[in-house]
Image: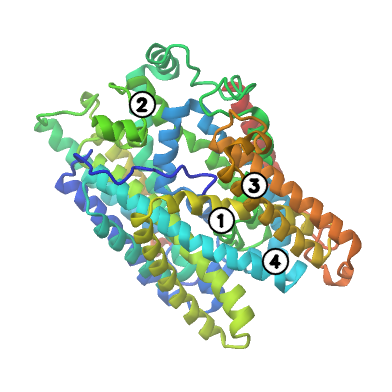
Amino acid sequence: MSIHLIALSLGDAPVPTRLLALAPVDMIIIALYFAMVLGIGFYLKRYTKTGDDFFLAGREMTAWVAGLSFLAANLGALELMGWAAAAYQYGILATHWYWIGAIPAMLFLGIVMMPFYYISKTHSVPGYLKLRFGEPSRVLSAVSFGFMTVLMSGINMYSMALVMKVVLGWDINFSIWVSSITVAVYVCLGGLLSAIFNEVLQFVLIWMGALLISIIGLIETGGWSGMVARIHTNFPGGDYTHLWRTMGSFTDNPMGIHWTGIVLGLGAVISFGYWTTDFLVVQRVLAAKDLRAAKLAPIIGAGFKMMVPFIVILPGLLGLALLQPKLMGEAQAVATGGHSYNEVLPLMLARYCGPGLLGLGVTALIAGFMSGMAGNVSAFATVWTYDIYKALIRKDATDAHYVSMGRWCTILGVLVSIGTAYLVMQFLSIMDYVQALFSFFIAPLFGTVVLGMLWKRCSPAGGFWGLLAGTLSSIGMWAWVKLDPAALKYIALSSNARDMAENMYRALWSWIVCVLVTVAVSLVTKPKPESELNNLVYGCTDIPGEGHLPMHQRPMFWAVVVGLCFVVLNVIFW
Amino acid sequence: MHRPGMVSIWFFVGILLLAYGVLITASGLYELVSPPARPVVLGELHAGIWWGAVLLVLGAVYTYRFSPRRQK
């Protein structure tokens, strides 16, 4: 996912040597993992008979399962390796993508938006747009989501295969086919139910595999203060351990970003767009067993998301403190035969993990990749089947027919992803373009959905034209900077801004365009009558109260707890 | 997620952690009696043994707590 993934641009240069060598016990551990995920798929097939079973896991998930799955679908292997690399390169600033770039949005989803998604009984985010704004908005959203999801899946697949080649010396074709066929089999058999079961398993494995690096690393450095002291010794003059102190100017921090970009672009627009409207993650919460579980799931996810830097960012910081010689950029690494930033996590894994533990760490990376891919294909299958095939091609088929379509679609989605992976292998620049393309839809979609949920006057025409205008403006800004790099100072407010800063500001402007156009068009067009807005919009929806529940069972209570922890962590690492 | 007869996801988690715990602990013990030629950094902590033991205990607890027999 473009906002949470720094693609590993490992390049196509020949790899001189692999970083890790596996022992037989490591291979057994990896083989056991594959056997387990496939076994779960075969086991769950018997429970996947109806459309609700296949596409929404029967809407029977507890808050914990839905919450962990919600997070795991986002916690891919490239997320682990990419953000560990970013932490080595930019220091603790990378944590913004886990805290302000996620927590407020996840809490907002749980407390404010989830009731409308859940009570409307929609099966997807485009499905909600259909109920709220009509068919054109749904088709625009569904087609863009489906297209981008399989493309992103292919890019992730290729990147992961490349990682396996660099880290383990595995053949790229072997990695692509084995992992994708495994995902296709278990999602095809058990649908979302199987994807969620495996995501919970993968979540546990990711933690168990990656946590040890941070623990032993802190022992080696003598704790946090020892690590900070070593970083200061290794990189005198650089500030790698403060979150906000260096954000007063574009030139004061290695990311080349200003705090307004982080707060308004990342925190207020991109993260809300991703966490509240990207169906890949929202689908997991829609599978919750009741409204309270649906509200709690993103809050539980937020609690764990806050801790993810401990297994992703901290290894990068430990790398800054401990690894000698220093890591370098990809081009320099290829030219000199050194190690690049992107290899920091496997290098730390090799530093501390002997036979057995190494297998567990590699399994964590594979599990991360597969959970992300399963998320992509299961969301794609749902959107294709319900929002494109059922809406535009065959409206009145039986439930069994749609389940069958979902299964075929899973296979199709995986095959298209594989095709994309091979396409990217031939034309590496596609990776940059598709990641940018994905970001075009996120921010405007959030503007459309949130106005639709909170403003009764918002009309169907306003929703459609706002979404279209926001998306087109984002594409236009991106193309403008590509054609004329000097335009960066207008889009990102500074010619010193880097790619990330540009993404932040582009998202902010496109969201503002979406909101302005939606409001303007809504005010001059006819809104839906209130009778048609029941269970879709604030003020027209009877949301069950929680006053009768004990405090510790109320989602709002836990949202406040997580919110307070979020504030405290930002103050501690200010 | 409690359909009649359906095994809990936490049971699957427990089984896998249990198996990993056994393998990693055994591997750590083997390294203890037969030290490798090129030990990892802080190899003297024998992380394989205690981390494997953590997985083993967690796995055993989850396997027992969510075993299909106890769920009936």
Q: Chain of mark 3?
A: A
Q: Nearer the viewer, mark 3 or mark 2?
A: 3
Q: Quadrant of residue B69?
A: bottom left
The vertical placement of A193 against A227, above or below, is below
Marks 3 and 2 belong to one chain: yes
How many numbered marks have been drawn onto this rendered protein structure?
4
CA gap, disc 4 to disc 1? 15 Å
Residue A312: tell me if it is visible. yes
Q: Chain of mark 2?
A: A
The residue at the point 57 percent across, 79 percent down is A389
Q: Which badge, 2 or 1, comes first in the chain's sequence?
A: 1
Circles 1 and 3 in contact, beta carbons < 8 Å: no
**Amino acid under label 2?**
Gly
The residue at the point 23 percent across, 38 percent down is A19
Q: Quadrant of residue B58?
A: top left
Q: Secondary structure at mark 1?
A: helix
The residue at the point 55 percent across, 45 percent down is A3
Tag 3 residue: A477
**Amino acid under label 4?**
Tyr
The vertical placement of A407 against A570, above or below, is below
Marks 2 and 4 belong to one chain: yes
Tag 1 residue: A281
Please tell me how crowded label 3 is: few (under 14), some (14-19), or many (20+) other residues with Cα within 10 Å. Answer: many
Tag 4 residue: A128
Q: Nearer the viewer, mark 4 or mark 3?
A: 3
Q: Which mark is residue A319?
A: 2
Please tell me how crowded label 1 is: few (under 14), some (14-19), or many (20+) other residues with Cα within 10 Å. Answer: many
Q: Secondary structure at mark 4?
A: helix
Q: Chain of mark 4?
A: A
Q: Which badge, 2 or 4, comes first in the chain's sequence?
A: 4
- Figure quadrant of the C terminus of chain A: top right
